Amino acid sequence: NISRAITMRTDGYSGEEEGPIIESELVPSSLAPIVPILRAANEIEDENPRVAYLCRFTAFEKAHTMDPNSSGRGVRQFKTYLLHRLEKDEKDTQRRLASTDAKEIQRFYEHYCKKYLEEGLQTRKP
């Protein structure tokens, strides 16, 4: 049951409540190290959906490395959900800043640092 694997919940993740699915809140406890990656993806989603997708992709790879057989409690369901999300997002997201994903991440990071760190808008963590 995935609801037992929630690390922290502020929005609904089913039809019971309105609100988006927040992947970082569905992570099984055995995959806790990927939570910060998914939180970063959620935080930057509106600014750059492609970089958010790449963060989720990284989280999926790390989850698969941590539990390749999906034997942990709730891991198979979580990885299946995240894989479906990645398949959808890959089609829906486009690079905005560069011609490759690596350059897209680098340019977004440079923009992020300038906007939030150098200009004193320190409402977010680096």
Image: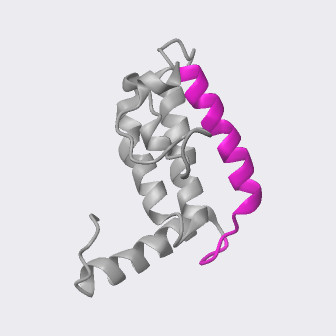
Q: Is residue 116 magenta?
A: no
Whole-percent x, y for residue 38 in the image = 45, 47
Q: Residue furthest bottom?
A: 119
Depth check: give the residue in front, 102 or 49: 49
Q: Is residue 89 magenta?
A: yes
- At horizontal 39% and vertical 47% (from top left) the residue drawn is 10
Whole-percent x, y for residue 4 in the image = 43, 22
- At horizontal 56% and vertical 54% (from top left) the residue drawn is 54
Q: Residue furthest top?
A: 71
Examine the image and state in which quarter residue 98 appears. bottom right
* Magenta stretch secondary structure, dominant: helix
Q: Is residue 8 left or right of residue 17?
A: left
- At horizontal 51% and vertical 66% (from top left) the residue drawn is 105
Image position of 100 with respect to 6: above or below: below
Q: Is residue 123 left or right of residue 81?
A: left
Image position of 5 with respect to 115: above or below: above
Q: Residue furthest front?
A: 16
Image position of 53 with respect to 71: above or below: below
Depth check: give the residue in front, 12 or 46: 12
Q: Which residues are magenta?
A: 75-99
Whole-percent x, y for residue 116 in the image = 31, 78
For the C terminus, give its image quadrant.
bottom left
Whole-percent x, y for residue 107 in the image = 49, 75
Instruction: Tell me which colouring the rendered structure shows.
Output: one colour
Count of numbered badges drawn on the protein: 0
- At horizontal 57% and vertical 38% (from top left) the residue drawn is 16
Image position of 29 with respect to 10: above or below: above
